[in-house]
Image: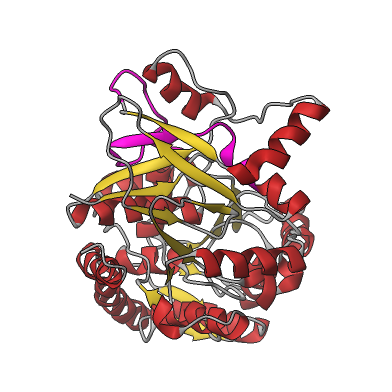
Amino acid sequence: MITACIDGFNLAMPHGTGIATYGHTLLEGIANIGARGQVLYGPSVGRQETAVMDEVAVIASTNRSRKGGFARALSTRTARFGRNAHAITPSDQVIWPTDGMRRPRAEAYWLAHEIFYLANRAYHQHGTITPVRFDAGRSGIATPDVMHWTCPMPLHAPQTTNILTVHDIIPLKLPHTTKEQKPAYYRQLKASCERADHIICVSEHTKRDLLEVCAIADDKVSVTYQPVIQPEAGDRDADAEWLANNLGLEPEGFFLFYGAIEPKKNLGRIVEAYLESRSKTPLVIVGGRSWLDEYETGLLNSVLEHGNSKIIKLDYMPRSVLDRLIRTAKATLFPSLYEGFGLPALESMAAGTPILASSGHALEEVVGNAGVVVDPYDPVAIQRAIIQLDSDMDLRRDLKVLGAERSNMFSAQNYRQRLESVYRTVGLL
C-alpha cells in the first residue's frame, strides 16, 4: 500500500485557509485511492515525552519559540544539512477543534520542530533548501512513498518522490495585491518547481501561467482541479428559523460574499456596484481582514458607519454556519480580480446557489456557462449582473440546475481518477 504525506503548514493555521481546505480534500483523495495518508507538522516545541503530548503540541503550539541570537543563527545556518521528523500515531485522547485547524484524515503524523519557519529563514538568509528525513524509529510507521508539498516552500524530502501543488502565481500576475517580496517569491517558486518530481496545478489557467513564467516541461505538470465536498442539503425550516432569529433574513432573501478581504477579492467594487444597483436585497459579507485591504473596506466601513442596514458584515463563521449561508443565499457575488481556482464559486454551485463570477482567469474556467460572468474591473457590469440576478427568477432557477451539474465535474470520484493519473506518471502505481 502506498503511503503519502502532505505538509501541514496550512492545516495548522487556527482559522484555516483555502490551501488548508485543499490539504483536507487531498487527504480524502489519497484515502480514496487506497493509500495511507500522513501529515508533516512543525510544532513550536520540540519532541515531547509521549505521543499524546506530541499530538497536544501540534494543536497548542501556535507561537514560534524565541531562541537567543546565537542559537537561532546556528539552527538557521545548519538547516541545509537537514532535519529529522519523528512519527506518532493519532490518538483518541486529544480533542481537536472542529473548525479551522481540524483533525486531518491521516494514519500518522510526522513532527519536526518549527520546520517550516526554520526552512524559510534558511532560504531567505542563506538561499539554502532544508531537507526533511523521516525517522520512524521503532514506531512501525511506514515512511512516505510520496511527499506532497501543498504550495511552494524551501523544503525537500530526499528519501521519497516529491510532488508540488501550485495554486496560482498571483504575486507575479497581480503584484500590487500581495505583500511578498516578488524577486524572492519568483526564485523560491522556480526552485520548488525544479526540485519537484512532478507538479500539480488546480486549473489549466494556472498551468499556463506557470509554464509562461518558469521554464518547465509541459509533461511535468498535471491539472487535477480541486474537488468539492458535496454539501448537506440542510433542513429548509431550520435554516429559515436560524436566518430569521440571528440575521433577520429569509432563504433566498440576501446576496452573499465570503472570503478573505484582500485586494484580489474585489470587495470594493462589489460594494460600489451593489449600492448603485439600489437593490432592496441585503448583502451579507463574511470575511476577516487580510492584507492591503484599505481600498476594499473604505467604502464598506463608511456605509456601515452611516447605519446602512442592507449590508451585514460578519467575521469568520463556523463552517456549519457558512454552509447554511451558502445554501440559502439568493446568489453568491464573487467577481474577483484573479483566482488560481475559485473554491467559493464551486462550493456555491454545488449547493445550488447561483454565482456571479468574473472573466479573464481560472474562475471562468471553473464556472463555465453555469454562472453570470462579468469583467471584474467594470463596476457597471457588476451592477447590471446584480440587478439581473435580483430580478430574474427564471435565470436563478436555471443557474441552480446548471451549477449543480457543473460541480459534478469536480466530484471526489473525478478527482480520484486525476490523482491516480499523477501517481502513475511518477511510477507510484
Residue 368 pos. (x, y %): 38, 84
Q: Is residue 193 above or below residue 11?
A: below
Residue 295 pos. (x, y %): 78, 64
Where, quadrant-wise, is the C terminus in this rendering?
A: bottom left
Q: Is 234 placed left or right of 377 in the picture?
A: left
Magenta span includes 94: yes
- Total marks shown come to 0
Using the rendered image of the protein, determine whether residue 263 is visible from the camera's viewpoint.
no
Q: Which residues are magenta?
A: 91-119
Point 65% across, 85% down: residue: 380
Q: Is 218 placed left or right of 240 in the picture?
A: right
Which residue lies most toward the top here? 49
Residue in front for this viewpoint, 31 or 15: 31
Residue in front for this viewpoint, 60 or 347: 60
Magenta span includes 215: no
Point 66% across, 81% down: residue: 379
Residue 91, located in which quarter of the rendered image? top left
Q: Is residue 67 above or below residue 100?
A: above
Q: Main secondary structure of the magenta part?
A: loop
Q: Is residue 251 above or below residue 420?
A: above
Using the rendered image of the protein, determine whether residue 417 is visible from the camera's viewpoint.
yes
Point 67% across, 39% down: residue: 78
Which residue lies most toward the front here? 81
Residue 293 pos. (x, y %): 74, 59
Residue 4 pos. (x, y %): 31, 50
Point 60% across, 71% down: residue: 169
Q: Is residue 282 above or below residue 49?
A: below
